[in-house]
Amino acid sequence: MDVVCLRTFSVAVAFVIMLTGCTRSPSAKFYTLTPLAPQETLPSVQKAPVAVKVMPVTIPDYLDRPQIVTQTGTNSLKTAEFNRWAGSLRNGISAVLAENLGLLLGSDQVSVHPGIGSKKVDYSVNMQVVRLDALPGDKVFLKVQWIVSPGQEGRGPAPQTRTFSERLSDSSYETLVTGISKTLEQASREIAGEISGLRNEKSDK
């Protein structure tokens, strides 16, 4: 009888251990967006650094969550429970945009509002992410609108609307996040070009 009980107990313990191993959740991975590397920027020809204030970027509500959101169909999305942003995606986009503009414009006076930065502001940038479609193994598609306005007025010409895309070499989340950073790089170059053009027009007057 003792032998039977011992065997039953052993089987029960083994079953519990097996269940514990099966129900153990994988650990989450965290990702951040990356700005341009200094060697990827063009040398600045501006004589004096331009002061730019990047206003907080707005993003669609469905993207404003810790999990990375990918597109699985025309009208369907998937949240990756174990592949997450290391911080706020909205704040991450704002920070990368500001850092990219600083590098592209050759200025150390580009900052995100509110925050530490020059009291004198030459231009402010308001950007809205209209769409950010991430398709693992395929591409990243970014649609943004922005306004570059003089000073901190927040008013300027009609918004610029542009779309950018980046092909993905594989279906990993690492590659996908890099692709998102690359589309933000493309947008940053367009905005930096607009600021440089406005500054040149101003100096010619």
Image (tube, helix red, strand yellow):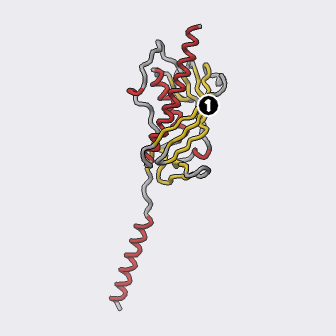
Residue 31 falls left or right of residue 119: left
The residue depicted at 42 percent of the width and 25 percent of the height is 41
Where residue 184 appears, as percent x and y from the top left, is: 51, 34
Q: Nearer the viewer, residue 99 or 181?
A: 181
Q: Nearer the viewer, residue 165 or 23?
A: 165
The C terminus - image quarter: top right
Q: Toward which corner of the image does residue 5 lie, by quadrant?
A: bottom left
Residue 22 falls left or right of residue 90: left
Q: Nearer the viewer, residue 74 or 27?
A: 74
The residue depicted at 36 percent of the width and 88 percent of the height is 4
Outermost residue, bottom direction? Answer: 1
Q: Nearer the viewer, residue 151 or 130?
A: 130
Q: Say above or below: 187 vs 23.
A: above
The N terminus - image quarter: bottom left
Q: Say above or below: 74 vs 130.
A: below
Where residue 160 appears, as percent x and y from the top left, is: 62, 28
Could you say whether the residue bearing mark 1 is in a helix, strand or loop? strand
Three-letter amino acid code at the position of disc 1: Thr
Where residue 141 appears, as percent x and y from the top left, is: 54, 40
Q: Say above or below: 112 vs 79.
A: above
Outermost residue, left direction? Answer: 3
The residue depicted at 43 percent of the width and 71 percent of the height is 19
The residue depicted at 35 percent of the width and 80 percent of the height is 10
How many numbered badges does the structure rendering display? 1
Q: Say above or below: 12 vs 179.
A: below
The residue that disc 1 covers is 161
Classify mark 1: residues with Cα within 10 Å, few (<14), some (14-19) or many (20+): some
Where residue 116 appears, as percent x and y from the top left, is: 51, 26
